[in-house]
Amino acid sequence: MSTGNSKFGVRKTGDGRLPGDLTRKQLLERIIRVDHAGEFGAVRIYEGQYAVLKNSDQADTIKHMKEQEEVHRAKFEELLAERRVRPTLLSPLWSVAGFALGAGTALLGKEAAMACTEAVEEVIDEHYQHQLQQLGDDESELKETIQKFRDEEIEHRDIARANGAADAPGYELLTSAVKTGSKLAIWLSSRI
C-alpha cells in the first residue's frame, strides 16, 4: 500500500504537500544546503578537536571521524554544484564556530570532546532520519547517500559513548548546550 498519493505505490518527494509547504525544488535545495553546512561544520569540529588532542590516545579516533566527515562534505559539495544549489551564507561563521567548539571542548578534556561529538551526532541522526522520511522514491540516490552518512554519524556517536563521553565534567549541561546550538545551526543554515 502506498504512503503517498502517487500512482502505482511510488511515493515522490513532495507528495502530500499542503498550501504553504516548501515545493519539491525548495525542499531539495534546503536539504542539500543544510547537509553541506552540517558536514562542513563537523569537519571543523574534528579539526579543532584534533588540533588539541593530536598527541593523545584519542588522535586516531578523531582523525578517523574527521576523514569520514570530509567524504560527506565532498559529496554535498558535489551535489551543490550538480543541482545548482547555493550554499549557506553562514559558512564563514560555521568555520570559526565549529573549530572553536571542537578545540574548546577538547581543552576541557578528551571526555568533553567525546561528549560534544555524542551530542552533535545525536542531533544529526534525528535530522537525517527526518530527511529520509521527507524524500520519496524519486530521490533514491540521495536517500542512499543520506542513509550511509547517517549510519556513519551513528557510528561516531557510539564511538564517543565508548570513549567516555558520559564522564565529561558537566556532561548534561555540555551536551544540552551543544544540541541546542546544533539545532539552531541546522535551522539557520537551511534558510540563510
Image: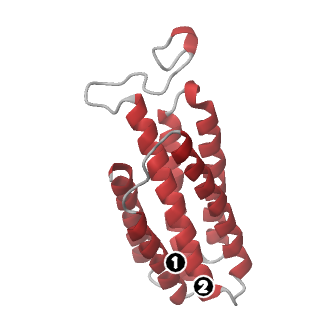
* Image location (x, y in percent) of residue 14: 42, 26
The answer to whether residue 91 of the structure is visible from this angle is yes
Tag 1, which secondary structure? helix
Quarter of the image holding residue 172? bottom left
Q: Residues within 10 Å of mark 1 (few under 14, many from 20)?
A: many
* Image location (x, y in percent) of residue 72: 62, 55
Instruction: Tell me how the rendering is colored.
Output: secondary structure
Tag 2, which secondary structure? helix
* Image location (x, y in percent) of residue 128: 52, 47
> In 3D space, how far apart are the residues under numbered discs 1 and 2 (Cα atoms)?
9 Å
Q: Residue at x 62, y 81 (%)?
A: 50
Of residues 189 and 9, the one drawn nearer to the viewer in this rendering:
189
Q: Residue at x 33, y 50 (%)?
A: 191
Give the answer, above or below, for where 123 lies relative to 132. below
Q: Which mark is residue 29?
A: none
Q: Which residue is mark 1?
A: 102
* Image location (x, y in percent) of residue 169: 48, 85
Label pair 1/2, CB-CB below 8 angstroms:
yes
Question: Looking at the picture, which amino acid does disc 2 mark?
Answer: Ala
How many dots with numbers?
2
Quarter of the image holding residue 48? bottom right
Q: Which residue is mark 2?
A: 51
